[in-house]
Amino acid sequence: MSRGFGIFWMLYMLFFAVPFPMILYYNIKDAEPPLLNETNPWLAVGLLGLSVLLWSIVLLSWFYKWIVLNFVAKRNVVHLAKHGVRRKAEILEAVKVSKPGSKYDTYELVLSFKNLVNTDIIQKAAVNDSKPQQHRFEKGKTVDLLIDKEVKKMPYFIFAGSEASINILIIFLITMGWLTIVTLVAWYYIYSYQTESNGMGWRFIIYWHPLLICPAILMFYKLIFFYFINRIFNGKQGESELIKFKGIRTTARLISADQTGTYINEQPMILFKLEYVDEQNQTRRAEIKKIVNLLDLNNVKKETVDIFYLKEDPSRIAFAEDLENVS
């Protein structure tokens, strides 16, 4: 259900990024044809350059996300297999989620192990079992993990013995799809020039031309969803994982919990002010913001709460209960 909802919104936003600006532009253009001889040629060249720059950024970002990241992830797994910090994890829960007849048995696991500073943590993970006859992933058994000592590159941990491979056919098809998009963009430049220039060069490019407005909207989406939401509301990418794998657990005293006035999906953001004693026996204070369900507002003002803090930067903290959901 959630996947279908995500696809719907992706197509919905794509419509307003590409077809909708084109529909508006050509309807306005047909109603009020632009006076090309009155257009500043240097302005047109500037807008053309900006258009090419925006499309280059959009297309290269897609190429990196769809294709390059696969090779980066494989390289990171190989590096982790050689240089990762080994930990032994106990399987607390194991649920088989693969369908009958699947190539591999897939399990969703809940693991318990010590992080990089020997603090006990709970971690959810999924694994494909290529040797089901060995029954390695059952509740109560132990498995070996390899953790990235810097917690900077995904994946942050792998199962010992894991191997990374790339499906060349899938990468080829994705590359062909990306090249098709590049070809369509290049074709639209040629088509627009042939049908709109009227012997006046690129003077037909205006601020709301699809060659400029379409990539601008796509860039706007990228900034909104990947910067604004992830950075402002969820913190820096990887921050929770860093604190979980390199953090020390302790109990903090809750000084105050006040609403900030910000609401996300009608749920209030709460500013928590905490006080705790670190491993050097120094008393520290820290603040953390969190979106709290309206039904849980009566439970936010506890006397104490468990947190994780970074040894090298004790001001960076996270609630222990939130880190249990980081997978």
Image (tube, helix red, strand yellow):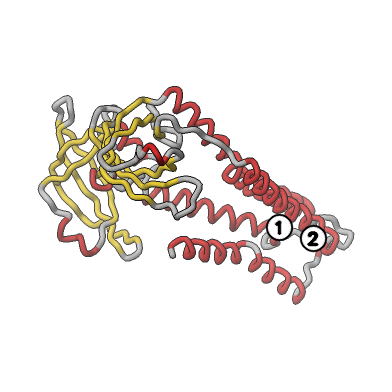
**Where's residue 22, x and y in %?**
69, 67
Could you tell me the amino acid type at mark 2?
A: Ser
Q: Secondary structure at mark 2?
A: helix
What residue is at 84 percent from the left and 64 percent from the top? 195
Label 2 environment density (alpha carbons within 10 Å; few <14, some 14–19, many ≥20): some
Residue at image mark 2:
192
Label pair 2/1, CB-CB below 8 angstroms: yes
246 is higher (above) or lower (below) than 235: above
**Residue reaching furthest to the right:** 199
Count how many numbered circles sit on residues in the image: 2
Q: Earlier in the sequence, mark 2 or mark 1?
A: 2
Label 1 environment density (alpha carbons within 10 Å; few <14, some 14–19, many ≥20): many
User: Which residue occupies the foreground of this view, 269 or 12?
Assistant: 12
**Where's residue 54, x and y in %?**
65, 49
Q: Secondary structure at mark 1?
A: helix
What residue is at 82 percent from the left and 63 percent from the top? 196
User: Which residue occupies the foreground of this view, 109 or 118?
Assistant: 109
Residue at image mark 1:
211
What residue is at 36 percent from the left and 31 percent from the top? 145
User: Which residue occupies the foreground of this view, 87 or 148?
Assistant: 87
What residue is at 14 percent from the left and 53 percent from the top? 301
Q: Would residue 318 be visible to someone looking at this image?
A: no
